[in-house]
Every structure is written in structure tokens, then in C-alpha cells.
Amino acid sequence: MQTRTKPMSNVATLTINAIIAALYVVLSLITPLAAGPVQLRISESLNHLVVFNRKLLWGVFAGCVIYNALFGMGIMDVLFGGGQTLLALTLTAVLQYKVKNAKVRLVLNSLFFTASMFLIAIMLHIVSDVPFWPTYGTLALSEFAIMVITAPIMYYLNQKLDFANRL
């Protein structure tokens, strides 16, 4: 039986979100395929944190925006990449109280991120003049792969760390 600890203070929430943003950037930097029409960003595993605690949305979003601003394709990458992440994370955050089963939310989160990769495909089509549909296909497939592979890992970590109550 898990005991519920008191909610995070604003300072603790801000600090943890800053750490998550930094971790997102670092994990993206060490990933060989972090950009382009095939993206296997290890940092995308952090998207699953919002399944367990919607307050962590801002750290993941900030990490994505910072990485895209510093190492991406300029303002378009910030707008489209940040927009895609914010859209999918918001959909997942809304589910926190409507869908009680964390495993179902992990599956839905993976699907939200996979489907929303159309925004990245649009951006790459505009910036790099790559064909939309094949690019969307490779992006969706690579996002789906990383989200599905990391979902059980994040579920296990949540069992040990209790992201909702101990952060």
C-alpha cells in the first residue's frame, strides 16, 4: 500500500521540471538519430512522465523546445516540434482523471505522439522539401517504436518512484 505524501511545492515542481528539461536535452544530444525523417530520440521516453503526473508536462515541453531551438532547424522546429509535443502532452494530461488505468494512458500517449508526428512531417516538408507522406510514415513509425519500447520501462520506474506522489 502506497502512502500519499504531501503535494509538491511550487519550487519543487519548478525544480523538477527544470531537471526534466535538462535531461531531455542531454538525452537528445546522445541520441544518434535525434532529428530528420527518422527520429529515435531516447528523450521521447520522458513524454510518458505526463501519464503519471501532468505537472511534469512543462519540463518535457521545455526540454523539447530548448533542444529544437539550440540544435534543430530554427524557429520552424521550435514552433512545429514544440507544438507537436504540447498537443500530445495536453491530450495525455487531460486523460489523467478520465482514464484511471495507467497502462491504457501509456498506450493512448504513445498513439497521440505517433499520430501527431504529422506536424513534424509538415515542418520537414516545408524546410527540407522532403515528400510529406513517406516522411510522415518514417516519423510515425520511429516515434511509435521509441514510445512502445519505453512505455514498460517508465511504468516500472513509476512503480518504484511513484512519479505522481513522490516528486
Image (cartoon, rainbow, N blue to C red):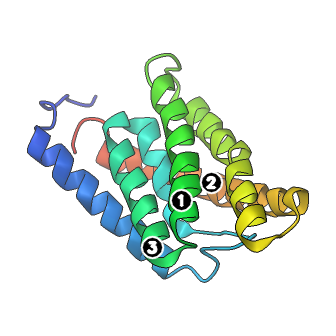
Question: What element does badge 2 sit on?
Answer: helix
Nearer the viewer's eye, disc 1 or disc 2? 1
| Left or right of 12 on screen, residue 86 | right
Q: Where residue 123 is drawn, which disc sits there?
A: none
Q: Residues within 10 Å of mark 3 (few under 14, many from 20)?
A: some
Cα distance between the residues tagged 1 and 3: 9 Å
Visible in this render: residue 23? yes
Viewed as shown, does residue 147 lie left or right of 70? right
Q: CA distance from mark 2 to mark 3?
A: 14 Å
Among the two numbered marks 2 and 3 on one chain, the one whose residue lies closer to the N terminus: 3
Q: Say few, some or many: other residues with alpha carbon within 10 Å of mark 2 (under 14 / 14 to 19 / 20 or more).
A: many
Question: At which x and y percent is residue 144?
Answer: 71, 53
Between 135 and 126, the residue placed more toward the observer is: 126
Residue at the image point whose x is 49% and y is 65% from the top? 43
Lower position in the chain sequence, tag 1 or tag 2: 1
Q: Which mark sits nearer the N-terminus, 1 or 3? A: 3
Q: Name the residue that disc number 1 marks.
A: 44
Residue at the image point whose x is 58% and y is 48% from the top:
84
Position of 112 relative to 33 (above/below): above
Residue identified by numbered label 2 = 147
**As displayed, is residue 125 above or below residue 140?**
below
Q: Label 3, on which residue?
A: 27
**Label 1 close to label 2 by CB (< 8 Å):** yes
Q: Residues within 10 Å of mark 1 (few under 14, many from 20)?
A: many
Q: Quarter of the image holding residue 40?
A: bottom right
Residue 123 percent across, percent down from the top left: 69, 59
Classify the position of the N terminus by image quarter: top left
Does residue 22 appear left or right of residue 80 in this picture? Answer: left
